[in-house]
């Protein structure tokens, strides 16, 4: 069995390629970094290190090779000869790999090959629809009809945390990837064409939208809140931030608000999501990952967009009758970082309101805008996290008594 792993970076090597290899596939990575291509083709193996605060475990990922992404014909042949494919290239790179994927799919059509599935491991909502649109934009009507019948665009939810790799983590081998132990890969069960392949730790699930929202509105939202609160405290690492009692209580409170909202929206048992939160909070304490508040909280503009982790989770909560008071603290802290990074913006209530209305899509005077501005104002006043948390508690209590 053969698999194409488009993207030989941290997620490609440190997670998806590793699972494919462990499942018995011969894995061909597609990448454009010459050193990665040459090393994989020379050694046919690379190391992954599972790290935790207690120590590490080294694993050699075997039966691998590489194809130069700058050689369209070679990439197309690899795709035509594969049984399964996955992508992990990053959202901004997708548009550059579409022509090569299209060429490979055309070869499969010409050769009348069996249905083909592409597991999409990108940090992008509705990634399957985005990639489908990019491909079909360049297809004939006949090709579009063939694709609908023969190509499965399967969204995945990437839960494994893989930090920026430092020289210390590489430990003398530039191909080494250090990752956390968590290794489950939820995928969209309904998107597969033909038989669902046997891949270690892959969890086909339907309806998959729940898993996507759980990842974004619980994991990503909690992670970002932890990062932005860490920023305010001048902390470098995520594990340092979550180790602060008040940060822990705020982050947990925010994640539990999302949990209640998701449970109501999708009919999933609340206990199941709460257990997932307990696991996540423990994983945030992994000092060996050395994941920074700067990285996790990076690109606050995207993370404050209307459907993303902070505003999106808050909106869902309000939709189903949950008051997102703790999430509002995370959004306010994210707003503080956003205003620090955008030229021409200052830390004022007026600028904050402008961002919430213009960028986040909130209506002026809306309940969510008022909650976030109240928390933001407390941050500007230098209130302690304990005081801010107690204000969130009062907001929740008021909602229970019908005051809000």
Image: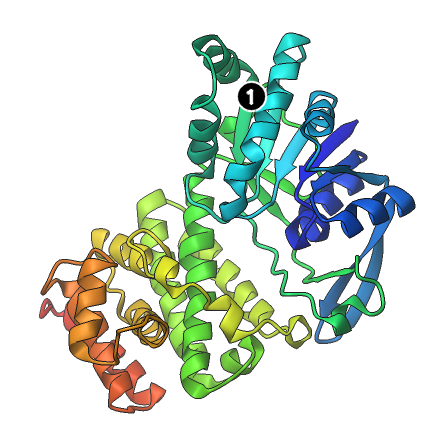
Instruction: Quarter of the image for the N terminus: give it.
Output: top right
State the scheme by which the image is colored.
Answer: rainbow
Q: Using the image, determine if residue 366 lies above or below residue 6.
A: below
**Residue 357 coordinates in the image, percent (x, y):** 18, 61
Q: Nearer the viewer, residue 87 or 18?
A: 87
Left or right placement of residue 86 versus residue 350 in this view: right
Left or right placement of residue 188 versus residue 247 in this view: right
User: For the residue labelled by badge 1, is the local secondary structure a helix, a strand or a loop?
Assistant: strand
**Residue 378 coordinates in the image, percent (x, y):** 24, 85
- Who's the residue at 47% across and 67% down the image? 223
Within 10 Å of disc 1 (Cα), the crowding (few <14, some 14-19, many 20+) is many
Image quadrant in which you'd find residue 216: bottom left
Left or right placement of residue 238 versus residue 10 in this view: left
- Who's the residue at 28% across and 91% down the image? 383
In this view of the protein, can residue 61 be seen by the observer?
A: no
In this view of the protein, can residue 386 be seen by the observer?
A: yes
Q: Using the image, determine if residue 159 lies above or below residue 240.
A: above
Q: Using the image, determine if residue 150 lies above or below residue 304.
A: above
Q: Residue furthest right?
A: 43
Image quadrant in which you'd find residue 203: top right
- Who's the residue at 42% across and 32% down the image? 129
Instruction: Quarter of the image for the C terminus: give it.
Output: bottom left
Determine which residue is flagged by label 1: 151
- Who's the residue at 63% across and 36% down the image? 86
**Residue 210 coordinates in the image, percent (x, y):** 42, 44
User: For the image shown, how many numbered marks are present on the structure?
Assistant: 1
Q: Nearer the viewer, residue 360 or 189?
A: 360
**Residue 14 coordinates in the image, percent (x, y):** 71, 53
Left or right placement of residue 158 versus residue 219 in this view: right
């Amino acid at each position: 069995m053969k698999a194409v792993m488009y993207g030989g970076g941290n997620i490609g090597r440190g997670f998806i390629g590793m699972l494919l290899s462990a499942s018995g596939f011969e894995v061909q990575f597609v990448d454009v970094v010459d050193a990665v291509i040459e090393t994989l083709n020379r050694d046919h193996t690379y190391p992954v290190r599972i790290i935790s605060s207690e120590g590490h475990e080294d694993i050699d990922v075997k039966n691998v090779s590489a194809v130069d992404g700058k050689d369209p014909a070679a990439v197309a042949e690899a795709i035509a000869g594969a049984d399964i494919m996955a992508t992990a290239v990053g959202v901004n790179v997708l548009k550059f790999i579409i022509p090569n994927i299209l060429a490979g799919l055309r070869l499969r059509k010409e050769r009348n090959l069996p249905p083909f599935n592409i597991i999409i491991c990108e940090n992008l909502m509705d990634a399957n629809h985005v990639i489908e649109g990019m491909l079909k934009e360049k297809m004939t009507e006949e090709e579009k009809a063939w694709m609908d019948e023969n190509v499965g665009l399967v969204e995945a939810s990437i839960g494994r945390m893989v930090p920026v790799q430092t020289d210390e983590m590489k430990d003398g081998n530039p191909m080494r990837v250090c990752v956390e132990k968590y290794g489950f890969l939820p995928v969209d069960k309904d998107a597969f064409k033909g038989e669902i392949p046997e891949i270690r730790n892959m969890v086909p699930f339907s309806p998959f939208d729940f898993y996507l929202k759980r990842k974004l509105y619980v994991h990503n939202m909690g992670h970002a809140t932890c990062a932005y609160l860490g920023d305010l405290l001048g902390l470098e690492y995520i594990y340092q931030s979550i180790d602060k009692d008040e940060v822990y209580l705020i982050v947990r409170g925010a994640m539990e608000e999302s949990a209640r909202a998701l449970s109501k929206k999708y009919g999933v048992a609340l206990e199941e999501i709460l257990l997932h939160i307990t696991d996540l909070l423990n994983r945030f304490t992994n000092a060996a990952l050395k994941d920074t508040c700067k990285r996790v909280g990076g690109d606050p503009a995207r993370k404050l967009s209307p459907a993303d982790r902070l505003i999106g989770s808050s909106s869902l909560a309000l939709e189903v009758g949950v008051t997102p008071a703790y999430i509002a603290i995370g959004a306010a802290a994210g707003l503080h970082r956003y205003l620090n990074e955008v030229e021409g913006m200052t830390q004022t209530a007026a600028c904050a309101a402008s961002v919430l209305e213009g960028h986040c899509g909130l209506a002026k005077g809306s309940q969510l805008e008022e909650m976030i501005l109240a928390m933001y104002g407390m941050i500007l006043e230098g209130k302690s996290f304990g005081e801010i948390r107690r204000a969130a508690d009062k907001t929740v209590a008021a909602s229970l008594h019908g005051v809000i």
